[in-house]
Amino acid sequence: MNILIIDAQGGGIGKQLVQAVKKDMPEAVITAVGTNSAATSAMLKAGADNAATGENAVVVNSRRADAIIGPIGIVIADALFGEITPLMAKAVAQSHAKRILIPVNHCDNIVVGVEDLNVRKLIQDVLSELHKMCG
């Protein structure tokens, strides 16, 4: 399974996702794409198999992924303090990959009806969804 993990800012959520997925599904190939070099570096240090930075990396790797994981802002243009460009959001939204979006209430995007869970619990939910995809 080819998994694309996208994160912005410092890459904290992406780093935790890479570590958790690598531990739980060591056979998965993880490509980490950061919207900036700090996010990419954090995910690469966490054990991603491949890493790239920027808009074109999101566009290209969204085409190749079986699953795309990241904060919900990766499908909202100008989210994550402006780090998600309209082209990035469109590429993720139009990808044929299954998207597993983490509902974080930051950066002026509030997801109502969702408990305010800690990141550890949200990552466990991501792993559950990945296992459902794999059968």
Image (tube, grey):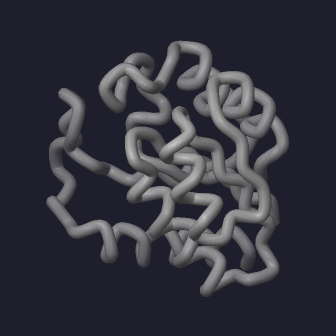
Number of numbered labels in the structure image = 0
From the image, which quarter does the C terminus lie in? Answer: bottom right
Query: Where residue 124 appears, x then y in whole percent?
Result: 42, 77
From the image, which quarter does the N terminus lie in? Answer: bottom right
In this view, 131 is above or below 78:
below
Please tell me which residue is depicted at 43% across the width and 25% down the height of the picture: 83
**In the displayed structure image, the side of residue 11 where residue 59 appears, left or right:** right
Please tell me which residue is depicted at 55% across the width and 69% down the height of the picture: 129
Residue 12 picture quarter: bottom left
Query: Where residue 18 appears, x then y in whole percent?
Result: 58, 67
**In the displayed structure image, the side of residue 103 where residue 97 appears, left or right:** right
In this view, 100 is above or below 78:
below
In this view, 84 is above or below 28:
above
Please tell me which residue is depicted at 44% across the width and 18% down the height of the picture: 77
Query: Where residue 75 appears, x then y in whole percent?
Result: 48, 31
Residue 89 picture quarter: top right
**In the displayed structure image, the side of residue 5 where residue 17 appears, left or right:** left
**In the displayed structure image, the side of residue 126 where residue 18 appears, left or right:** right
Query: Where residue 11 appears, x then y in whole percent?
Result: 45, 51
Foreground residue, 127 or 54? 54
Foreground residue, 49 or 98? 49
